[in-house]
C-alpha cells in the first residue's frame, strides 16, 4: 500500500521516476521491499508431490505449501513449521531449491524440498480445503514463482513437466 502522506514530515507523497513513492518535502522514499515467503515442495512417499488448494483461490487452482517468515525465524525452520501447520505432516528438510520473484504479490519466494513419510495422515488446516498427491512424472508447473521452483526441482530429478497456464 502506498503512503498518501510522508511518515517523517506528513507532506504529500508522489510517484517518482523509478516508480517509488517519495516525499517532495524531505525526500523520504517508500521502497516497498518484497516480503519473504517460503515454499515447500513436499515429497510424500516416493516421487510424489503434494499440491494444495487454498480456500481463497479459484476452483481448480492448486499450489505448493507456502508461508510468511515470522520475526527472527530462519527460512529452514519456517518451511518445516508451515508444512506442519498446513498439512499436519512432520517433514525432513532435504534441500534448498532456489529463490524466485513473485512480482504480482511483491514477494521473494525461498523454495525448499522437504520429505514426508506417506504413512502419516494429511490433516488440512483452515486455510486449505483440498489437496492432491501427484506423481513427479504427472506434475505440471505454472508461470509464477512457486511454479518455477517446482519446475526446477522436477528438472533436477530428470523430469520435464508440462506448463499449465493460468486460465
Image: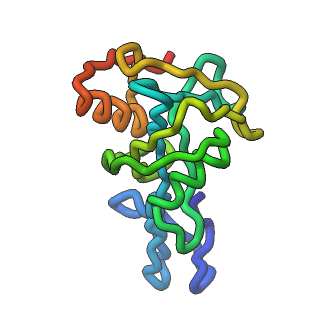
Q: How many marks?
A: 0
Measuring 44% from the left and 67% from the top, which residue is drawn there?
31
Measuring 42% from the left and 26% from the top, which residue is drawn there?
46
| Lateral position of residue 54 relative to residue 94, left or right | right
| Lateral position of residue 39 relative to residue 67, left or right | left
| Lateral position of residue 94 relative to residue 132, left or right | left
Residue farthest along the front direction in this orientation: 119
Measuring 31% from the left and 28% from the top, which residue is drawn there?
154
Expressed as whole percent of the image width and height from the top left, the position of residue 23 reads 49, 75
Expressed as whole percent of the image width and height from the top left, the position of residue 84 reads 63, 48
Question: Considering only vertical position in the picture, is 69 above or below 143?
Answer: below
Q: Nearer the viewer, residue 24 or 63?
A: 63
Q: Nearer the viewer, residue 137 or 44?
A: 44
Measuring 62% from the left and 25% from the top, which residue is drawn there?
131
Question: Considering only vertical position in the picture, is 154 above or below 164?
Answer: below
* Residue 141 falls in image quadrant: top left
Q: Nearer the viewer, residue 63 or 115?
A: 115
Expressed as whole percent of the image width and height from the top left, the position of residue 7 reads 60, 79
Question: Considering only vertical position in the picture, is 140 above or below 91?
Answer: above
Expressed as whole percent of the image width and height from the top left, the position of residue 63 reads 52, 30
Question: Considering only vertical position in the picture, is 100 above or below 149?
Answer: below
**What is the image's colouring?**
rainbow
Q: Nearer the viewer, residue 108 or 133?
A: 133
| Lateral position of residue 49 relative to residue 148, left or right | right
Residue farthest along the right direction in this orientation: 126
Q: Quadrant of the N terminus?
A: bottom right
Amino acid at each position: 500500500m502506498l503512503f498518501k502522506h510522508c511518515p517523517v514530515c506528513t507532506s504529500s507523497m508522489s510517484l517518482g521516476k523509478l516508480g517509488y513513492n517519495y516525499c517532495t518535502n524531505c525526500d523520504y522514499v517508500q521502497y516497498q521491499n518484497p516480503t519473504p515467503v517460503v515454499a515447500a515442495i513436499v515429497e510424500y512417499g516416493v516421487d510424489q508431490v503434494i499440491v494444495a488448494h487454498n480456500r481463497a483461490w479459484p476452483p481448480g487452482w492448486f499450489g505448493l505449501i507456502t508461508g510468511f517468515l515470522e520475526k527472527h525465524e530462519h527460512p529452514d525452520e519456517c518451511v518445516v513449521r508451515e508444512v506442519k501447520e498446513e498439512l499436519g505432516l512432520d517433514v525432513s528438510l532435504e534441500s534448498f531449491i532456489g529463490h524466485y520473484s513473485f512480482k504480482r504479490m511483491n514477494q521473494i519466494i525461498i523454495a525448499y524440498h522437504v520429505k514426508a513419510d506417506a504413512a502419516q495422515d494429511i490433516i488440512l488446516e483452515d486455510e486449505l480445503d483440498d489437496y492432491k498427491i501427484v506423481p513427479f512424472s504427472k506434475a505440471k508447473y505454472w508461470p509464477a514463482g512457486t511454479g518455477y521452483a517446482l519446475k526446477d526441482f522436477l528438472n533436477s530429478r530428470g523430469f520435464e513437466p508440462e506448463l499449465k497456464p493460468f486460465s
